[in-house]
């Protein structure tokens, strides 16, 4: 088994893209949830909140 530190450096790009993808998906889910909350939380007759 050979240890080549340069392979780690070369793979940082792929790790960064994977993390970016995770953050994008999380952002989409959060935005979708916030939009649904605003759409469905309309005031009903007689509600104070």
Image (tube, rainbow, N blue to C red):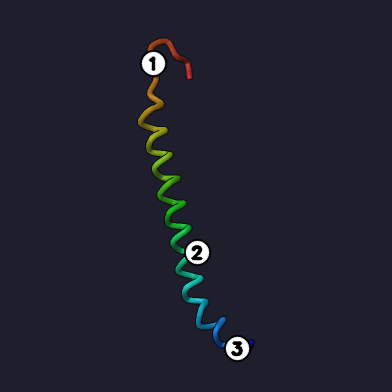
Rendered position, 9 above or below 44? below
Give the quadrant of the N terminus.
bottom right
Rendered position, 47 above or below 41? above
Q: Which residue lies furthest to the left in this view?
A: 39
Circle 1 SS class? loop
Rendered position, 12 above or below 29? below
- The disc placed on residue 44 is 1
What residue is rendered at 56% in x and 88% in y? 6
Circle 2 SS class? helix
Residue 18 picture location, percent across and down: 47, 66
Please name whichever residue, 16 or 5, is drawn nearer the observer in this view of the structure.
5
- Residue pointed to by mark 3: 4
Q: Do the residues labelled 2 and 3 touch (CB within 8 Å)?
A: no
Rendered position, 25 above or below 48? below
What residue is rendered at 38% in x and 12% in y? 45
C-alpha separation, residue under disc 2 versus residue under disc 1 = 41 Å
Residue 7 picture location, percent across and down: 54, 84
Please name whichever residue, 48 or 44, is drawn nearer the observer in this view of the structure.
44
Between disc 2 and disc 1, the foreground one is 2
- Residue pointed to by mark 2: 19
Q: With 31 as the anchor, is 3 left or right in this view?
A: right
Between disc 1 and disc 3, the foreground one is 3
Q: Do the residues labelled 2 and 1 touch (CB within 8 Å)?
A: no
What residue is rendered at 41% in x and 26% in y? 41
- The disc placed on residue 13 is none
What residue is rendered at 38% in x and 35% in y? 36
C-alpha separation, residue under disc 2 versus residue under disc 3 = 23 Å
């Amino acid at each position: 088994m050979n240890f080549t530190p340069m392979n780690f450096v070369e793979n940082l790009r792929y790790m960064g893209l994977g993390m970016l993808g995770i953050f994008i998906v999380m952002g989409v889910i959060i935005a979708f949830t916030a939009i649904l909350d605003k759409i469905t939380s309309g005031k009903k007759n007689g509600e104070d909140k």
